[in-house]
Amino acid sequence: MREEVIPINLEAVLAETGRMKAEGYRFVTMSSAELDAEKVDILYHFDKDLKMKHLRLTVPKDVQVPSISPLYLAAVLVENEIQDLFGVRFKGLAIDFNRTFYLDDEIKTTPFCKYTVGRVNEGEPVATPAAEST
Amino acid sequence: MATRTIIPFGPQHPVLPEPVHLKLSVDDEVITEAIPALGYVHRGLEKLVEIRDYNHMIQVVERVCGICSMIHAMVFCQGLEEMMDVEVPPRAKYLRVIWSELHRLHSHLLWLGLFADSFGFESLFMQFWKIREKVMDINEATAGNRIIVSVNVVGGVRRDLTPEQMRWILSELIGIEKEIKRLTTTILDDYTVKRRTVGKGVVTAAQAHELGLVGPTLRGSGIAQDCRLLKYAAFPDLDFEPVVEPDGDCYCRTKVRFREALQCIDLVRQAIAKIPEGELAAKVKGRPEGEIVTRVEQPRGELVYYIKGNGKKNLDRLRIRTPTFANLPALLVMLPGMYLSDVPVIVLSIDPCISCTER
């Protein structure tokens, strides 16, 4: 990408997002992409004076990611969308549609992933290995 | 004693052009909370990149929105051109500006009509849509279709405008401009319109920035941000300043779109005056590889495309963030404290396009 992309790990999500907010960055959106059977890439896009900056978080699908909606309320819709379409669960969402934002209750698979992570109890990951960062 | 009630607004409502649901918590007639719900028209179009090659995807992204279709195709092609280092010929850039500004003009006229209808002014709704028909006629005469004009290809455009067509467009724009200006007093100075819009759904500049609002919803709160300032297509050569209003209410958002409609006419005139001769499209070699984030200004605001390619004809990922997706959280701030009767006007004031939002 032509703009700056900063790789972050799970523990740094809120800190880095808070830093972006303190520096006056506007939240644009988040993008996610399935990398393989186990991992997804989540990109956070920010803008200030029409210059973009991105944070990249690579996480296993079965790990809960801290929600940035307490910092940027605008993120609530896209985090719910990622929950629905990629199965990544966000912790601390300002409004949690619990995977019914786009999908009906009975849909248990993740439409935008080739591989869906199963859950023993709804809302809990199967396992919580330490998240790997890029 | 106040009584609390939950009232569903939508997904079917006479005022809503597309289905969106708002769960409104109401104390007597005053809104205390609004929670949006989507999913009624989610088509999963982004997933199609995995089975359609990137040239076919142009036809898919054109159908994300039934109002600003051309601009979706333009930003998609723009992203691929940046990834593949394709230099678009100057004539193609000007043609893209002409068709995209015509789309912006018809979109704003459509919205002005729907907005008038939201507070019961049906004759004004019909007047704006009557003017809009002339823009539809221009699209149909020059590109073969009223909305989905299908002029963009990777590397440029696939249709040209003859000198006779450009002269005809200019003559049509004279009549369109005259008819829009004739409605200025009715939409902007009418006592009843102002009673329904001034001071309603206020978003301050600080709130607008915090919420990440875009487009006329943002510029109606006094922030002069417009992606056309990124100087894509032929905008570096055109005189352009964002239209801004300070007060952040429904009236200011209306004024921004009304003035932008007139600005679109000016931009089309400038583009026709300056368009150079030349090729319509550059040769494209190779396939898209890598990642890119690209943006343009849609009628509703900033349209963001994230494209990821792997050197094959099918892309890895396409992520589309439309302006209504960014502006919907604004309703959580605009609606509390307002009367239930103001909800249709406030919801429509962000110019919601739900087919864009859900894709």
Image: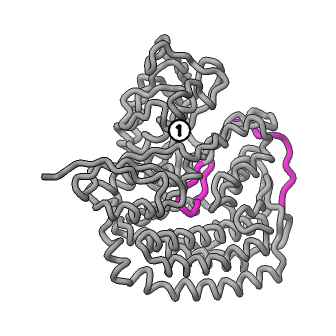
The residue depicted at 63 percent of the width and 27 percent of the height is A113
Give the left or right position of residue B85, taking residue B226 as reference: right
Number of residues whose C-alpha sits closer than 10 Å to that of mark 1, classed few (under 14), some (14–19) or many (20 or more): many
Pick the residue in front: B273 or B105: B105
Per the image, the residue denoted by label 1 is A102
Corner quadrant of residue A72: top left
Outermost residue to the left: B1
- Type of residue at label 1? Tyr
Give the left or right position of residue B351, taking residue B132 as reference: left
The chain letter under disc 1 is A
Any part of residue A2 in sight = no
The residue depicted at 50 percent of the width and 71 percent of the height is B257
The picture places residue A27, in percent across and down from the top left corner, at 45, 45
> How are the colours assigned in the image?
one colour
Pick the residue in front: B243 or B144: B144
Any part of residue B257 in sight = yes
The picture places residue B99, in percent across and down from the top left corner, at 70, 68
Q: Is residue A133 magenta?
A: no
Give the left or right position of residue B313, taking residue B309 as reference: right
| Relative height, residue B63 to residue B252 (above, below) | above
Give the left or right position of residue A115, taking residue A50 as reference: right
Q: Is residue B300 magenta?
A: yes
The residue depicted at 63 percent of the width and 62 percent of the height is B67
Pick the residue in front: A61 or B194: B194
Regarding mark 1 in the picture, which secondary structure is present there?
loop
What stretch of residues is rendered in magenta? Answer: B281-304
The residue depicted at 31 percent of the width and 47 percent of the height is B6
The picture places residue B357, in percent across and down from the top left corner, at 55, 49
The picture places residue B325, in percent across and down from the top left corner, at 50, 49
Pick the residue in front: B26 or B129: B26
Corner quadrant of residue B161: bottom right
| Relative height, residue B356 to residue A68 (above, below) | below
